[in-house]
Amino acid sequence: MINPKQLIAKCKFQEKKYRKNTAKLKQYLYGNWSSEHEENIERFVPTMYVIAKNNLRGLHEQFQTKLIEMEHSAFQHLTNLVGDEKFNNETVLAFITQQIIPYYIGRFNIMFSRELSFLPLLLRLKVYLMMYEAETNLEVKWHIRDRIMVTVAKLGECEIAELLALLNWFEQLYKKDINANYEFITNITFIHQARETRKTILKERGYKADHPLDEVSNSLSLLLDLNKIHDKKMALLIFELLTIYYPFLKNNELCHIIPNFIKTEDHNLLGKLGKEINKIPINYSNYFVNHKNEAHLLPDELSKWLNTHREEQLKLYIQKQNSKSVE
């Protein structure tokens, strides 16, 4: 697995070494991106960092070729994760194509991902992959790729997640984003802990990660926590997708009530069950990266305050962006 601080140090050494003769960097891009993850990182990434950070146009073509090879490698593995045998229901695919994708096309960013995060991981990944394939806006694709990275990290597919983190890192460097290195370190730190963190969070909620029925129950409990919902329209679409993907839900009395509950926010529809479910806390792992490129976990009280503030700001942001799209 990648050690982000060590990798950035190697990248900076490569930059210093070839600052006055960047043409020699071309030799480090010969050969194809192979199946050996760590070997690829060692062989190609420091040079790609220098090209991206300094926008070396003389090596742009070779740089783009490597990006395409990286993306192809990552998405080949992703396609295998959500193989056709897992998603051969045409009704599910049609719903994603006709309802989810048009809602986000051309405007999705990571702030819009809350309701999609309610889905079980493999179904969530399938939605993101279909969104990515349909999207043409490069900036929007960056945001979708970020969410794919988060999802596969939670599935425990760290090498794929690291590849996606690298792709987004290079793009940030190319755009002269001053936070590029900080965000890369934070992403890699998250990737290495994501699966175990998710298991812990689900356990605290009374569920077992990867257990099919527990995953569905977790999705429903999230939909019943109105504090977590930023976009009611998408929450309703997510619920409908769940009932299509899991047909048995249509026969559950509670699931007939959920859409009305989301629309009306009337807790009387759920009674005691709803009140208990809404006590589920919001849990995030909050990291910051200091000036020494060290990742730290925020103190609990500060983390809780930031989460509350963030929730309020996100809801306002989603409302504003949705009103703009209607206009």
Image (spheres, helix red, strand yellow):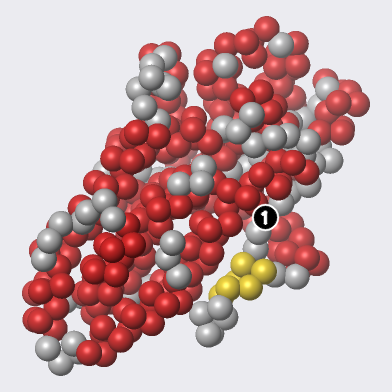
Figure check: 100 above or below 152:
above
Q: Would you say 46 lies left or right of 233 here?
A: left
Among all residues in the image, which is located at the extreme right?
Answer: 272
Q: Which residue lies under the disc numbered 1?
A: 284
> Residue at left 77%, top 30%?
265
Image quadrant containing the C terminus: top left
Q: How far across and down, in percent of the image, does residue 323 sit?
A: 52, 42
Depth order, front residue of 105/197: 197
Image quadrant containing the N terminus: bottom left
Q: How far across and down, in percent of the image, does residue 267 sit?
A: 84, 28
**Residue 113 seen:** no
- Secondary structure of the residue carrying tag 1 is loop
Depth order, front residue of 213/272: 213
> Residue at left 38%, top 74%?
7
Q: How far across and down, in percent of the image, does residue 140 sit?
A: 36, 49
Q: What amino acid is at disc 1?
A: Tyr
Q: Would you say 36 lies left or right of 311 here?
A: left
Q: Residues within 10 Å of mark 1 (few under 14, many from 20)?
A: few
Figure check: 13 above or below 232:
below
Figure check: 19 above or below 192:
below
How many numbered circles are shown?
1
**Residue 82 seen:** yes
